[in-house]
Image: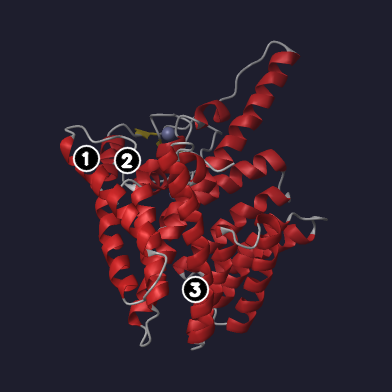
Amino acid sequence: MNSVSKSKVSSLKSTLHTLANPKGVKKQCELCHKPAYLQCTKCRVTFYCDTDHQQADWVGIHEKVCQLLIPIRTTMPFHSLQADRDHHCAQIQHRQELIEISRAVAQKKLFEGKYQESLPAAKLSLRCAMDVYGPSAVQLVPAYLLLAEANVGLGSLAQAEEYMSQAEWTVMKTPNCSHTVLHQLHRNLGRLYTATENLEGALLHFANDVYYASDAYGMNNIVTCGGYFLMANVFIKQGKMDIASSLYNEVARTWHSHLTTLLKTHTEGSRTLEQSFDEAQQEEADQMLRAMLEIQESSPKQDKTQNALVTHCLAMLWFLCGSPEKALEFGRKALQSIQLVPDHNLTEPIQSLMQLAAETAQHHTNQAEPCPSNNLPPSQLNTKVES
Ligand SMILES: [Zn+2]
Ligand SMILES: [Zn+2]
């Protein structure tokens, strides 16, 4: 937890209420469903068994949705059928909004490797989806998968398996299930199999994942190539470095062309970063590219072209995320790698990116007030939720 959220938590703590429940009314803890003794005083509709759970929920999701929960959890008397109907429609809309917000928050935390912290958001997403769609709807699957992924990350494999079988069972009962959902299902089954060291099983699921993802998003898409990346990680575990390396190459090329396009639209000003790149995707890209670079650099036969490709990707990513200094750092690395590969067409784009980054960095130092669109850390850049 950073110091900012720590201080927020402690300031919130002082506004916590000890509950005196009226007889017969049992409030449940938001996180563990045990009897609750504390209430969030900001919304007054969320309850906790103790301060630990209140803090965990605050950091995990509640901070972002505290006020949004008020209309959902407040019952009002209605004087007409129409008013009641309108209220019902508004409730569903609020809940759908909450499903999306909490799903995006959980996803981002998972990409950051904050598995424990992702749980409150994933659980809220599941609960809202159940309220809106019912207990066995296919719309619950994304939340089950987030919960499974978090538990794989935490090493709670039995719990992960439970969520996975819920997801599988739901998908099986859904005729003509969308390929987007099937891709997510197989990706998570692959993760679970990787964690349980069933590597052949994992590869099979990742192959299915890639199949459905390319159908839903296209072959050379960043979502699809996430599956290639996970497959490559399995091949590394199996000691099959050559196959892994060619898959990583595929991933690097896909991200390279994606980031090149983003950079172009960004510098032309035709699209803002927020419109093309959400926070979770930024995080995924950063994690993946840095992992690939690390593997590359520790490998005995370094592929300089791939090295340059990946470092150039990182330079573009950091430039787009408003950190020209880091962009310059990776740009320099990329140039070093490319110098060892003669006649490569990457030199020019790297140099012009570095030029841009240097100008932006200069602009920052000249300004007393940092430029708002270009000087935010990636985590603060975008609060928009993927629809
Ligand atoms: Zn609790
Ligand atoms: Zn609250």
Quadrant in which residue 4 is drawn: top left
Q: Is mark 3 within 8 Å of ligand 1?
A: no
Quadrant in which residue 201 is drawn: bottom right
Q: Is mark 1 within 8 Å of ligand 2?
A: no
Q: CA distance from mark 3 to mark 2?
A: 30 Å
Number of numbered discs present? Answer: 3
* Residue 219 placement, left or right of 230: right
Q: Identify the disc placed on residue 374.
A: 2
The residue located at (34%, 34%) in the rendering is 16
Q: Decide: is 264 above or below 339.
A: above
**Kind of residue sitting beneath label 2:** Asn
Tell me if residue 253 can be seen. yes
Residue 217 location in percent, x, y? 65, 55
The residue lying toward the viewer, choosing from 47 and 331, is: 331
Q: Identify the disc placed on residue 364.
A: 1
The residue lying toward the viewer, choosing from 122 and 162, is: 122
**Kind of residue sitting beneath label 1:** His
- Disc 2 element: loop
The residue lying toward the viewer, choosing from 270 and 323, is: 270
Label 1 vs 2, first from the N-terminus: 1
The residue located at (54%, 47%) in the rendering is 103
Q: Decide: is 44 above or below 266.
A: above
Mark 3 lies on residue: 248
The residue located at (29%, 41%) in the rendering is 375
